Amino acid sequence: MRNSVPEELNYVDWFRHSSPYINAHREKTFVILIPGEAVECAHFSSIIHDLALLDSLGIRLVLVQGARPQISRILSNRHLPSRVEDDYRVTPQDQLLDVIQASAAVRVQLEAQLSMGLSNTPMDGARLKVCSGNYVIARPLGVVDGIDYGHTGEVRRIDTEAIFRLLEDDNMVLLPHLGFSPTGEVFNLKSEDVAIQAAIQLKADKLVIYSEEEGVFKSNGELYSELLTKDAEVILKEKSLPKVTHAALDACVQAVRQGVPRAHLISYHENGGLLRELFTREGSGTMIDEDSYEKLRPAHIDDVGGMMALLAPLEEKGVLVRRSRELLENEVDRFIVIERDGAIVACAALYPFEQEYAGELACLAVSPDYRGSNRGERLLKGIEQAAKYQNLNTLFLLTTRTAHWFIERGFSETTLASLPTQKQALYNYQRNSKIFAKAL
């Protein structure tokens, strides 16, 4: 047997798990912000390869380029002042050509990398078509608080009609951080503003922002894999984030608040971060959305297949009692599930014994890929709420393996005699399950 077989099997397993995301993303429009720092990072060529892969999977890409470090370097070499006020670079007339030069250099570098077709590389046979032009219409920022921002501007509108035509013709569209006015003037724009407006006006399915950090971190150093906009706004008000991360998160929140379904923060330092974020269950960065894409809800008949796949491994190990498809279909209204991107990742059931004002918690199961993120607690709370709604005052369960988990959540061991009479008659002495109960 070849030594590479286990690695190949891991790849096959990953590819199978990524297929739902591949199907979900096909023919969708993504706006991706590539700041100037990303162009100079060690993994820039890998970012280009990842973009080529997205294009090959039928994803319509609009790239927005930044050039902050490149502009600063040119101004420094010319011994010119580099002034930034309220995150906007002041662009006097005598610095406009420097800004244009830096932007053009980054654009050419991006286009050159996207044009690679060397054999024995990930770009072999990519045949990417990249279009750039005057698709961003801008206006001057003007004088704000006594500061004349010169040729610094803001987005007036995006020429969506022209961009859509290019996307439909299988082009990748590249938008610089430069905008143009109807009077023929050129304005230096914040790349975040261009990305926000492009995502909003194109009704993009996602806004992705490459940044220095992997995303937003909790105070204990743990990465937020998902943030609702309301929670992200609280973090922004605290002003505890690094400046670059704060700006990127603010852009994501603005876009989502104005109709973009989801926005993502990922690091340009992580090789393959974009692919992990888009095609794996846990991602690699922080996703921002208006409502959680992981929903706790009542189960319905279409969930039975997913529930069976979830329960089967636990049934084989003897952790849960086997249930047939027919039984699950008949009892599906007893279940609640957690759905994530169309997949059932957790479930639990409540069987009421109304005469005794008691309910049985059964079939609490979380997919191994999603354990450790409080989903079990969410299910338990959902079952407890359902029991209270049905005027039940006691919740009990039978378990052979997970006693300590329930003890830590307020359950106490009890006797068979404490169970409803009907449940006592069904007790399986061969399994010898321990019995726990909790007052609601």
Image: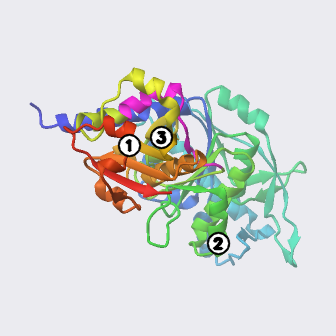
Q: Quadrant location of the N terminus?
A: top left
**Which residue is painted at 62% across and 47% down in the image?**
262
- The residue nearer to you, when weighing 40 against 206, is 206
Give the mark nearer the N terminus: 1 vs 3: 3
Identify the amino acid type marked 2. Leu
Q: x and y percent of residue 209 in the render?
A: 58, 54
Q: Residue at x 89, y 48 (%)?
A: 182
Which colouring convention does the figure follow? rainbow
Asked if residue 252 lies left or right of residue 121, the reply is right
Is residue 292 rendered to the left or right of residue 136?
A: left
The residue wearing badge 3 is: 353
Residue drawn 42% across the image and 47% down it: 46
Residue 219 in the image: state x and y as whole percent: 49, 73
Q: Residue furthest left?
A: 1
* Mark 2, secondary structure of its residue: helix
Query: For residue 13: magenta?
Result: no
Image quadrant in which you'd find residue 298? top right
Q: Amino acid at mark 3?
A: Phe
**Tag 2 or tag 3, which sits nearer the N-term?**
2
Span highlighted in magenta in the image: 291-310
The residue where tag 1 is placed is 365
Residue 128 on image: x %, y %: 53, 33
